[in-house]
């Protein structure tokens, strides 16, 4: 004699219980991790929530997921995604939010890992997508809207900050010593201003100093000199003619 669970009605009830169990565990996962898109291998209270979510997406793609279940998932989990790629993006953003909440910045180190998620590599990949024109506008907006300090080119931002720090210290040096021609080993407030000045002159000679930075130095420091030893008969430290093209 067939048991009740072998009947269509019994199988239906068992399937419904499994679905409700999955929903309940997904709610718990969201409460703990802030996302309804668990990464591969994720478990909550011993339940393989990643497998359950993947199975529901598969059912959806194959047309096997009923309309009421589709509605349940979309209604109860505002960040639910049927696309794996979309889900992966949401997982990354959720981990970045967590990182910002802890560290106060979205400038993540390349090798940073958060809760087992390789956040640093994920951030690096999204910036690469942006540079190659592969990042959709709505995702660009997510980064720029949610993370006020977000930088698409953090190295450029870091370089700009370092330049501003050097200029500020050079102003202090001038206030103390009356000249912007700091000796090579000069230090001001712990900052190696002599080396910084030498490096900017070297950048200028190599043509790697941006024109606006060259103009800043010349405008803010009246005695600024690009050369220590004057070429072509110029007096020591004299400023020779230059065009913007020379410093690009």
Image (tube, helix red, strand yellow):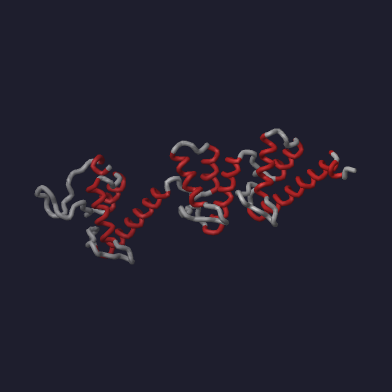
In the displayed structure image, the side of residue 139 where residue 30 appears, left or right: right
Between 225 and 66, the one lying in front of the other is 66
**Residue 244 sits in which quadrant?**
top left
Most distant residue in the left direction = 233
Most distant residue in the top direction = 63
Give the image location of residue 213, x and y in percent: 30, 48
Q: Which residue is depicted at the point 24% across and 58% down?
A: 180
Q: Is residue 63 above or below residue 125?
A: above
Between 110 and 99, the one lying in front of the other is 110
In the displayed structure image, the side of residue 148 where residue 36 appears, left or right: right
In the displayed structure image, the side of residue 4 where residue 41 appears, left or right: left
Between 167 and 128, the one lying in front of the other is 128
Most distant residue in the front direction = 1
In the rendered image, the quadrant that contains the C terminus is: top left
Give the image location of residue 25, x and y in percent: 72, 51
Q: Which residue is depicted at the point 73% across and 37% down?
A: 65
Give the image location of residue 192, x and y in percent: 30, 62
In the rendered image, the quadrant that contains the N terminus is: top right
Between 120 and 54, the one lying in front of the other is 54
Residue 174 visible in image: no
Residue 157 visible in image: yes
**Residue 64 sits in which quadrant?**
top right
């Amino acid at each position: 004699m067939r048991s009740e669970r072998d009947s269509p009605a019994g199988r239906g009830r068992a399937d419904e219980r499994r679905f409700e169990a999955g929903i309940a565990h997904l709610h718990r996962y969201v409460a703990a991790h802030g996302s309804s898109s668990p990464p591969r291998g994720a478990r909550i209270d011993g339940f393989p929530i990643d497998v359950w979510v993947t199975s529901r997406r598969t059912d959806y793609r194959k047309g096997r997921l009923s309309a009421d279940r589709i509605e349940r998932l979309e209604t109860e989990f505002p960040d639910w995604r049927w696309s794996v790629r979309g889900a992966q993006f949401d997982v990354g953003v959720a981990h970045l939010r967590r990182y910002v909440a802890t560290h106060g910045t979205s400038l993540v180190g390349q090798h940073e890992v958060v809760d087992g998620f390789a956040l640093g590599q994920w951030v690096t990949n999204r910036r690469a997508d942006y540079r190659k024109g592969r990042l959709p506008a709505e995702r660009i907006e997510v980064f720029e809207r949610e993370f006020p300090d977000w930088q698409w080119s953090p190295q450029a931002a870091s370089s700009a900050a370092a330049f501003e720090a050097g200029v500020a210290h050079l102003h202090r040096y001038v206030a103390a010593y009356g000249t912007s021609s700091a000796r090579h080993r000069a230090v001001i407030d712990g900052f190696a201003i002599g080396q910084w000045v030498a490096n900017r002159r070297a950048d200028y000679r190599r043509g790697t100093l941006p024109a606006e930075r060259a103009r800043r130095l010349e405008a803010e420091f009246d005695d600024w000199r690009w050369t220590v030893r004057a070429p072509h008969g110029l007096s020591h430290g004299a400023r020779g003619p230059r065009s913007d093209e020379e410093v690009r």
